[in-house]
Structures are given as structure tokens and as C-alpha cells.
Image (cartoon, helix red, strand yellow):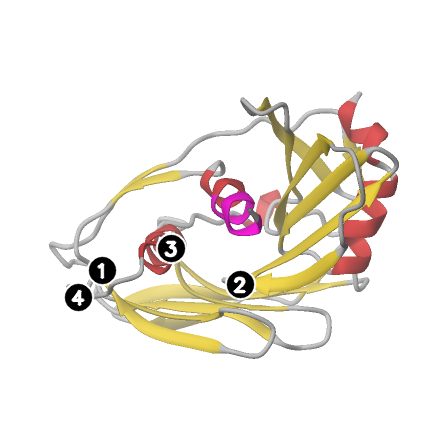
Amino acid sequence: MIRFFLFFGILIFSFEIYAAEQVYFKVAVDNSTYTAFMGGKAGLDNTTLNYLASKMRNQLFKISDIDRAYYDIAQPVSMRFAGRDVLQYDLKPKNADRFRHMLMVDSTNEVVHKDVYDPSGKLVYSFTILEPEDSSAKPVTAESEHEKTNHCYLGFCVVGKRMLKDGTSHIMLSDGINKFSIFRKRVSGEVSASKKIVYGNYVMRKKQGDDLFTVVGTIPYSAMQTMIENYSKLEE
């Protein structure tokens, strides 16, 4: 069930139409294990990893989307990387309530390299585009636009809501770079709390009152707990 919420949670932010590009991808599969592979290669027998690699491949970034109230942002460094002119950004959270991102972005705002670290400094995932800018394998990106609402808390704004068929409420939030989903479902009986890393995302499950919450994304467990406690502010 947690893997379903993970897969559904990351699915909602964008969708991609892509060719057989080459991407180096490294991800924390769980709390203690990493896997690394080349995306776009035949024979990779793991649907989740294939999907995650393609999703990482088609990210866009604009520095104007980042609220400097929550990040220390150094002057970007101009360089040449993977056959492209890029700007390198280092987005360091001012507090330990979200993940650090180090990115290289080309002139089209496409992310060609990214490293993401949790507050302890653990690498949770990394990817690098290997083909040059003029490659015929360059994918077409279809971005799903989400409008921020006035429902924000600690810099995270609601960018989407939906109700699943089984009655689970799903709220999507973003601060422009770190994203997460909150799933809430009314359940009876006791449910064991859990915290784990699943394919580069933190996942926390906890019952509060009569509701079971599952939070999936790139924020630490302490921030997930804060969001659960203040869930009513997001659902208004």
C-alpha cells in the first residue's frame, strides 16, 4: 500500500513523452540501500525505476519559483556541462524542514543534473543527463501546470486536491522545489506507525484520531508530522 501511495504521489506533478535518452540515475531504494543505473537502456526490468528515471529526466526549474524566506541561495555559477551551457544552483534550506537541492539548469530551464539531500546530508537521489544538447533523442516535455492556492503553511502551498475511489483524500503541496503528498483515510482499529525511504522519497504513515495519514515526498519526518498536525489549515 505504501508503494502505491508513493507511485501515485509522484505521478500527479507532471507527465512525460520521452525517447530512449541516456540518463544516469542513483536513488536510495530504502533506508540503507542505493541503486544506480542508466535510464533509456533496454533490459531494465523494474517499472518503478524506469518511471522514476523518466520523471527525473523531464524536470524544469525557475529560480523565481523559490521563496528566499526558506532558502539560502548562493550566486549561481556558470559552466559547461554535458554539452550544454548551464547555471549551477545550490538551494540550502534555512531550517531542517525540507531537502537541499543542487541543480544544473540549461538555457531552456531544463534540469540536466540534480542532487537531493535530506537534512542529515544523506543523498536521496541524483540524476545526470548524458546526451548532448543537440541529441536527436531529446524528449518532448509536457508539463502539468498547477496553480498555487491561498492554502499555504510554512511556505508549502496546496497545488492540487482529489478524492480517490476508496474515499482517500489526496492533497499535493509544493514550495517550488520540494514537493509532497498527504493521503488521509478514515479507518477503524489500530494501525502501526512507520517511517521509511522508498525510491528517493520519505514516507511516513501515522494514525491520528480516526484518520490514517500517509505522507510522501522530499521533506523530513518531523515536517511530515507538523503537516499532519496542521492538516485542517490545508483542507479549508
- Dot 1 corresponds to which residue? 133
Q: Main secondary structure of the magenta part?
A: helix
Of the two numbered discs 3 and 4 on the same chain, state the one appearing first in sequence: 4
- Image: 50 above or below 147: below
- Dot 4 corresponds to which residue? 43
- Residue 5 in magenta stretch: yes
Residue at the (20%, 53%) spot, across then down: 138
The secondary element bearing badge 4 is classed as loop
Of the two numbered discs 3 and 2 on the same chain, state the one appearing first in sequence: 3
Residue 143 x %, y %: 39, 35
- Marks 2 and 4: CB-CB under 8 Å? no
Is residue 69 visible from the viewing direction of this image? no
Between residue 92 and residue 152, name the one nearer to us: 152
Of the two numbered discs 2 and 4 on the same chain, state the one appearing first in sequence: 4
- Dot 3 corresponds to which residue? 48
Q: CA distance from mark 3 to mark 2?
A: 12 Å
Is residue 20 visible from the viewing direction of this image? yes
- Image: 117 above or below 211: below
Q: In which quadrant of the rendered image does the C terminus lie?
A: top right
- Dot 2 corresponds to which residue? 200
Of the two numbered discs 1 and 3 on the same chain, state the one appearing first in sequence: 3
- Marks 3 and 4: CB-CB under 8 Å? no
> How many other residues sit within 10 Å of disc 1, few (<14), some (14-19) or many (≥20)?
some
Image-quadrant location for residue 154: top right
The secondary element bearing badge 3 is classed as helix
Front: mark 1 or 3: 3
Residue at the (75%, 39%) spot, across then down: 212
Q: What type is the residue that disc 3 sits on?
A: Thr
Q: What type is the residue that disc 1 sits on?
A: Glu
Q: What type is the residue that disc 4 sits on?
A: Gly
- Marks 4 and 1: CB-CB under 8 Å? no
